Amino acid sequence: MLIGIPKEIKTLENRVSMTPGAVESLVRQGNEVLVEAGAGVGSGLEDAEYVKAGAKMVSAAEAWGAEMVIKVKEPLPAEFQYLRKDLILFTYLHLAAAEDLTKALLESGTIAIAYETVESPDHTLPLLTPMSEVAGRMATQVGAHYLEKTQGGRGILLGGVPGVYPAEVLVIGGGVVGTNAARIAMGMGARVTILDLSHQRLQYLDDVFQGRITTMMSTEPNIRDMITKADLVVGAVLLPGAKAPNLITRDMLPLMKEGSVIVDVAVDQGGCVETIRATTHDDPVYVVDGVVHYGVANMPGAVPRTSTFALVNQTTPYAMRLAAKGVDALKDDPGLALGLNTYKGQLTCPAVGEALGIESVTPDDVL
């Protein structure tokens, strides 16, 4: 198969979808790999390394002209021109919060497979997990930074010092993002509370953290109560493929402390905070009612070396299966089939259809 690796064009997005090692594996499998010149530079991967691995360095248009294009982030409007009916696109999509992109994929007939909805046999999300781990860990260190007075925050050191109370960190959602955010916050000495809907998950977290964090059910009264105490709130809610629910509403913000910080990791799925909007690494924060909001939708792009290798470790086996069998690979793997979001003009992710009000079918219906 002819495989294209374009350079990411999202603002300050320095990840790349395939490392030279992954390219070498694809080439050994008998594929031809076209890598856009400079695609890996932001992750410290030079063109010469890709050439040595067997890739051909090309322009953006040539990379997009391949049978299968592997990316990191969703296509931006400038890239919609490359979408077409004979293209397999394998990348993060987050369509529930991207109506224009969804329509572009449907109108073009592109076969789009989203990393974030691929499932393992145990119903975990193997291609979302590595970036969730990065984003969760980053959420705490980013939040700690914006709590500094010079950054608009309350002027609080996350872990305090002897004789001074540490920061209160509230994590909404006890999944991969929330667990990693809590781990870093606890390690920095903060007082941490995690809210989740699953009592079983809260039991697990209590065991994992050996009772050193507080666990509570995620109910509106508990959220209202806890945000009044929190210095840093991390939004870590995930409904696979669907739009995140607004758990912190506009009317709740006046309850929060002046200079407190919200880091909403769910922003790429619409966010779990009503007042959040997507921001970029070059302009990451804004203030509403005295509360600092951080809404960067590609947080792991700030640590591209780590993120690229973590992502490619997980995506490469799936990419190799798709390269070997094309769409037929989806028929052999029900978990990979769940990644199918659009297929020849049809929306194949019901959660996206519900979020956007677009008629949808299931992957099984089209495969």
Image: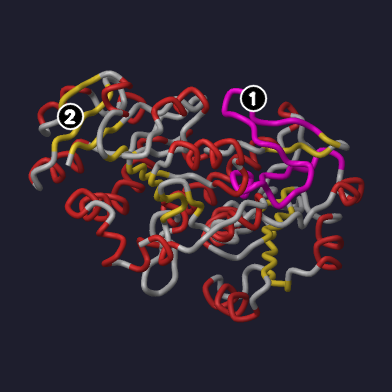
Say which mark, if any, is on residue 291.
none
Residue 112 in magenta stretch: no
Give the residue at x 64% y 76%: 198
Give the Cα distance between marks 2 and 1: 32 Å
Name above or below for residue 26 compared with residue 120: above
Could you tell me which quadrant the N terminus lies in?
top left
Q: What colour-coding does the image apply?
A: secondary structure
Residue 283 - label: 1
* Magenta stretch encompasses residue 262: yes
Per the rendered image, the range of residues in magenta is: 258-287
- The spot of residue 330 in percent (x, y) is 31, 61
Q: Secondary structure at mark 2?
A: helix
Q: Residue beneath label 2, please?
A: 50
Task: Tell which circle, 2 or 1, labels the residue nearer the N-terminal end.
Answer: 2
Q: Quadrant of residue 53?
A: top left
Q: Main secondary structure of the magenta part?
A: loop
The residue shown at (86%, 55%) is 228
* Residue sitting nearer the eye, 29 or 110: 110
* Amino acid type, label 2: Tyr
* Coordinates of residue 302 in the picture (x, y in percent): 48, 33
